[in-house]
Image (tube, rainbow, N blue to C red):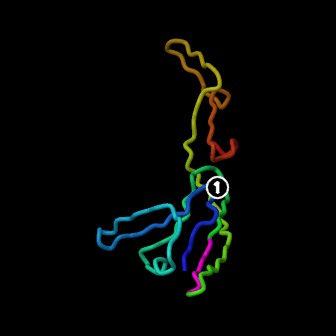
Amino acid sequence: MTLSVEQGPRHGRVLLVVTSRRQNGAVRESNLTSVTSVDLRDPAVRLVYRHDGTETASDEFVLALSQDLRGSGQVRSETTTCHVTVLPVNDARPALGTSSLVRVPLGGSAVITSANLRAVDDDSDDQQVR
């Protein structure tokens, strides 16, 4: 039996990840095109969905499992759609800027208020930025 990607995800990749026992646990990754069911039984072989980092919260892809029916020349195939839910991570750095000019006389002081500052964080609501 062979597992293959019939339709890839829009916001990520389906990878075949192999951990080498001979090379001190070196990891080799490649885009999954097809893999045999015998290879998938190996604990060093994993299928991984890797998100592309965009702000999308879901994705999907279609896998096909095919079996060559011995002696008949026919191939039986089944497909399934894999649905992925992406958990958002608050990893964008907030940006701090100024909204207006503050003039301070030499030797003087000025109070900087929220009217003078502007903060933006792509992962947070503006009211959540403090």
Which residue occupies 63% across, 47% down? 123
Identify the residue at the far top of this view. 106
For residue 32, side relative to residue 100 (left or right) = left
Vertical arrangement, residue 88 with respect to residue 114, above or below: below
Vertical arrangement, residue 127 with respect to residue 113, above or below: below
Which residue occupies 64% across, 55% down? 10
* Number of numbered tags placed on the structure image: 1
- Compare residues 113 and 120 and report the one nearer the observer: 120
Give amino acid for label 1. Answer: Arg
Per the picture, the main secondary structure of the magenta-coloured stretch is strand
| Quadrant where the C terminus is found in the figure | top right
- Compare residues 90 and 86 and report the one nearer the observer: 86
- Compare residues 71 and 40 and report the one nearer the observer: 71
Q: Position of residue 110 (x, y in %)?
A: 58, 21
Report the magenta residues as a range.
Answer: 64-70
Label 1 secondary element: loop
Residue 44 lies in quadrant: bottom left
| Quadrant where the N terminus is found in the figure | bottom right
- Compare residues 71 and 127 and report the one nearer the observer: 71
For residue 115, side relative to residue 97 (left or right) = right
Which residue in the structure is indicated by mark 1? 10
Q: Is residue 65 magenta?
A: yes
Q: Is residue 63 magenta?
A: no
